Amino acid sequence: MARVITILIAGAFATAVLAPMNAHAGTDTDTFTVTANVLATCEIVANDLDFGDYNPVAASNLDAATTLSLTCTNGTSYNVGLDLGEGTGASTATRYMADSGDTYFLGYTLYQNAGRTTLWGANVGSNTLAGSGTGSAATIDVYGRVPMTQTVPSGNFSDTITVTVTW
């Protein structure tokens, strides 16, 4: 009987060793969060306004225009304003270009519309341009006018305008 038990045990052992084993692969899962903070921001690029040649004895205004390029985050509300420039005594109605010696001044005006009826200024809610960003560049027109028959000597005149976008 011991021999039968030994054979049975040996047979069971051989069956267990030789039998195919079931493979068990383990798995586990977890998650992670991906985040970003999108900033409300704007970027403005200004192009120069060149009136060209002004004839002070001509009986007509000298008009010119330029553009600003404004890119703001989609949905960001903004206001674009233009300061009064460097000329002493300037206002939104009349800014001044100065000659190289800051002795003589040539008056001009900046407008938001082609009809030259809406003045540009820097007072948010009063004389700035309001809008909302789309995420793409928007072109903003600036229209200028040098009134006729100003009594200034010949020469080069210039001014510097600072464009400010507030959001």
Image (cartoon, helix red, strand yellow):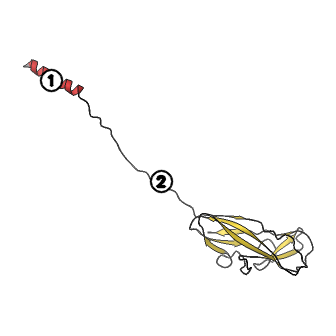
Q: Residue at x 33, y 40 (%)?
A: 26
The correct choice, above or below, for 90 with respect to 134 in the image is: below
Judge left or right: residue 24 versus residue 103. left
Q: Position of residue 21 (x, y in %)?
A: 26, 31
Within 10 Å of disc 1 (Cα), the crowding (few <14, some 14-19, many 20+) is few
Quadrant assignment, res 53: bottom right
Which mark is drawn over residue 9? 1
Of the numbered discs 1 and 2, the one sitting upstream in the chain is 1
Which mark is drawn over residue 113? none
Q: Position of residue 83 (x, y in %)?
A: 73, 72
Which mark is drawn over residue 34? 2
Q: Position of residue 25 (x, y in %)?
A: 32, 38
User: For the residue marked with disc 1, what is the amino acid?
Assistant: Ile
Which quadrant holds the C terminus? bottom right
Q: Position of residue 115 (x, y in %)?
A: 73, 80
Foreground residue among 60 and 144: 60
User: For the residue marked with disc 2, what is the amino acid?
Assistant: Val
Quadrant assignment, res 114: bottom right
The correct choice, above or below, for 148 with respect to 44 in the image is: below
Mark 1 vs 2: CB contact within 8 A: no
Which quadrant holds the N terminus? top left
Q: Identify the element where label 1 is drawn.
A: helix
**Separation (CA) of disc 1 from disc 2:** 59 Å
Within 10 Å of disc 2 (Cα), the crowding (few <14, some 14-19, many 20+) is few
Q: Identify the element where label 2 is drawn.
A: loop
Judge left or right: residue 40 versus residue 23. right
